[in-house]
Amino acid sequence: MKIWRSSEKGDDKIIAYFNDTIYQGNPKPADIENVVHNLKMQIIPTDNFTGIPLSYLKEIHLRNGNRYIEILFGKESLEQLKISDLGKRIEIFEYFKTNIPKTKYSVDSYSALRTGKKPLIAMCVVVGICTWALYISNGMENGNEYKVVGVQRSLANIILVIASLGTKNILLIFGPLFVIALASFIYKTRNPKIVQKIIVQR
């Protein structure tokens, strides 16, 4: 049996492993000592406590930058063991790696481009929509008329609405969005993801 406790805000107050089950719980502060005592007596609390049997377990992930450990189980189920202290988070993961039977350990190191894929796509979308809207807006300001033929909720119709705001307002709207996406891209590519995985082998 192994029990970990945390008093940090947002953390799971108790994480435990015994009887081939991973437990997490958030009892009231006044009840924590009693809960820990009961766990040592192998009495499982019924309130604010959940368990994941190893028979359901698929993978356990520890990702740099995350303040939790991911537990993948069932078909599409995902649970998070929230623990903000890095040292304790690593300790829990290492304990699982050593004590959960029939597992394989692997490390998935993301490239900079793979890590920054989502903000890169966001930048491309922002630039594409902004460029299209600016082109239409500039035409409107020069006396051209535009009309969308077909589905009223099409992307072209949305672009036409944006274009009607004027070129200056478009730049004011999309400029900050591009800067946010760019900042996210730079941050993520400078801090590529590294995911340590414990994979249960059936």
Image (cartoon, grey):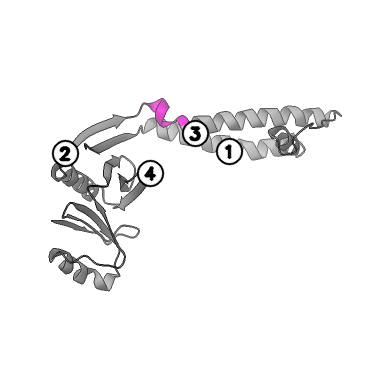
Q: Is residue 113 within the magenta segment? A: yes
Query: In this image, 164 relative to 94: left or right?
Result: right
Q: Residue at x 26, y 32 (%)?
A: 107
Residue 79's spot in the image, x, y percent? 34, 50
Reading the image, the residue beneath label 1 is: 177
Residue 6 vs residue 3, the one in the foreground: 3
Question: Of the residues shown, which amino acid type is indicated by label 4?
Answer: Glu
Residue 119's disc is 3
- Distance between mark 3 and mark 2 Cα atoms: 37 Å
Which of the pair 165/33 is nearer the observer?
Answer: 33
| Residues at circles 4 and 1 in contact by the CB criterion of under 8 Å | no
What secondary structure is marked by label 4?
loop
**Predominant SS of the magenta segment:** helix
Q: What's the amino acid at mark 3?
A: Pro
Magenta stretch in the rendered image = 111-117
C-alpha gap between disc 2 and disc 4:
21 Å
Residue drawn 72% across and 32% down? 156
Q: Is residue 9 above or below residue 135?
A: below
Which percent across, then down, holds residue 108?
A: 29, 31
Q: Quadrant of residue 32?
A: bottom left
Q: Earlier in the sequence, mark 1 or mark 2?
A: 2
The question of residue 180 being in magenta is answered with: no
Q: Earlier in the sequence, mark 3 or mark 2?
A: 2
> Which residue is labeled 4 in the image?
76
> How far is the residue under mark 1 from the one under mark 2?
47 Å
Distance, label 4 to label 3, CA atoms, is 25 Å
Q: Position of residue 168 (x, y in %)?
A: 72, 36
Query: Given the image, on which type of amino acid does mark 2 rest?
Result: Lys
C-alpha distance separating marks 4 and 1: 33 Å
Question: Which residue is identified by label 2?
Answer: 102
| Vertical relation: 79 (above or below) 37 | above
